[in-house]
């Protein structure tokens, strides 16, 4: 949420109560500067962890609605931006109850349930990709592109930035790097693939920077030269600057950042989402990425990925990077901010 008034204003995040939210928002403080940032938990997270089911969301939504309404009034919020997910329902309904203008942002290439349900309550519905806009969309649906943090707006890193990034990680700056990203929570399939294949990559002169997910270090490969395992990467622009190739899930934010840095990627969509939106996210980047089914992560895939990382894959990498460099607008964040302020 964005409050317009006496500078520096205020940003309030109504979250589901997941631990990763606090960690990600700590990173956001860097580019917010002096603007205060407050995190308010709506208590939607289930004790066992993971995403709550629809019945669990509905059961927890009434007390969450009260918490959201109180937070909106106490922080004098002037406009609400709903990002989908479990927290969107109580937050948007609380904003309507408090008569606060509401906007939605759909960052996936397929519209989520929250966007579809809550669009009638919104003054504006912003889309990162044209494919998420309904066929007969009212005029308040607007395609902006995926908003990016300022650190991603400089375009693809040049050779000197790549060299400096690799040295910052303690890598050999002359050797190619495979960056493996399983998302903020990690991905068991990618971790297992790394555990089996990292020794081969390292023996073939390819370094591997691997984000495993919090508490999941044991799922990765054994320690050794050329392998850089980390549970959570705080500085993603720096990590992407090291990369020759990226192996990742198909989360919308991850792919937008990969595209902004023009890093060729193999995308392994999470296979158990009902709408397979991660696959749609990857398809939005066209030939800038290669989509690989999780079930096909095997020795044959490893050989193809290894070739892409090595000098023989330079031509393919250049073609992919060129596509990625044209795939995202770098002014989406500025346009979104202007639209939100226009709603106040």
Image (cartoon, grey):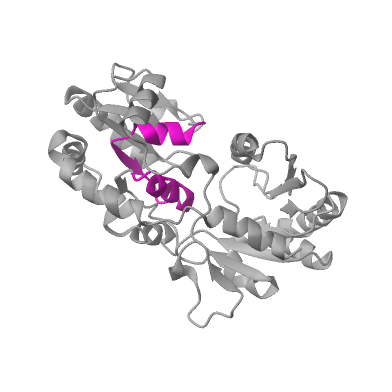
How many marks overall? 0
From the viewer's perspective, is residue 52 above or below residue 29? below
The stretch drawn in magenta includes residue 220: no
The stretch drawn in magenta includes residue 254: yes
- Image coordinates of residue 195 in percent, x first then y, are 30, 30
Q: Which residue sits at x=61%, y=61%?
A: 54
Q: Which residue sits at x=60%, y=65%?
A: 114
The magenta-colored residue range is: 234-262
Q: Which residue sits at x=67%, y=48%?
A: 16
Q: Which residue sits at x=51%, y=83%?
A: 136
Instruction: Report the quarter where the C terminus lies.
Output: bottom right
- Image coordinates of residue 135 in percent, x first then y, are 48, 80
- Image coordinates of residue 276 in percent, x first then y, are 41, 61
What is the quadrant of residue 241 in the picture?
A: top left
What is the quadrant of residue 149 in the picture?
A: top right
Residue in front for this viewpoint, 86 or 74:
74
Q: Does 3 sit left or right of 293 as displayed?
A: right
What is the quadrant of residue 335 in the picture?
A: bottom right
Residue in front for this viewpoint, 24 or 270:
24
Q: Does 242 sit left or right of 319 as displayed?
A: right
- Image coordinates of residue 187 in percent, x first then y, are 41, 41
């Amino acid at each position: 949420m964005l409050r317009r008034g006496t500078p520096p204003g205020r940003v309030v995040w109504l979250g589901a109560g997941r631990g990763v939210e606090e960690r990600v928002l700590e990173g956001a403080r860097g580019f917010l500067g002096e603007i205060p940032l407050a995190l308010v938990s709506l208590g939607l997270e289930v004790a066992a962890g993971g995403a709550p089911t629809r019945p669990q969301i509905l059961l927890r939504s009434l007390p969450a609605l009260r918490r959201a309404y109180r937070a909106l009034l106490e922080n004098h919020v002037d406009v609400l931006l709903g990002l989908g997910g479990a927290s969107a329902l109580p937050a948007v309904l609380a904003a309507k109850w408090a008569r606060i203008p509401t906007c939605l942002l759909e960052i996936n290439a397929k519209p989520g349930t929250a966007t579809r349900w809550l669009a009638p309550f919104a003054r504006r519905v912003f889309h990162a990709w044209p494919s998420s806009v309904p066929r007969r969309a009212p005029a308040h649906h607007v395609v902006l592109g995926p908003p990016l943090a300022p650190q991603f707006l400089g375009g693809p890193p040049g050779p000197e930035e790549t060299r400096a990034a690799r040295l910052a990680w303690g890598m050999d700056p002359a050797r190619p790097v495979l960056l493996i990203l399983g998302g903020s929570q990690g991905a068991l399939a990618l971790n297992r693939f790394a555990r089996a294949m990292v020794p081969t990559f390292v023996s073939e002169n390819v370094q591997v920077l691997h984000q495993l997910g919090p508490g999941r270090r044991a799922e990765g490969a054994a320690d050794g030269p050329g392998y850089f395992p980390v549970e959570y990467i705080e500085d993603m622009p720096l990590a992407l600057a090291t990369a020759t190739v990226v192996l990742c899930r198909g989360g919308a934010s991850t792919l937008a950042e990969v595209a902004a840095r023009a890093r060729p990627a193999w995308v392994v969509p999470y296979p158990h989402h009902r709408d397979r939106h991660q696959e749609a996210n990857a398809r939005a980047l066209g030939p800038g990425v290669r989509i690989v089914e999780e079930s096909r992560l095997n020795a044959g895939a490893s050989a193809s990925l290894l070739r892409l990382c090595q000098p023989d894959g330079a031509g393919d990498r250049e073609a992919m990077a060129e596509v990625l460099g044209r795939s995202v607008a770098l002014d989406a964040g500025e346009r979104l901010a202007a639209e939100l302020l226009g709603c106040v």
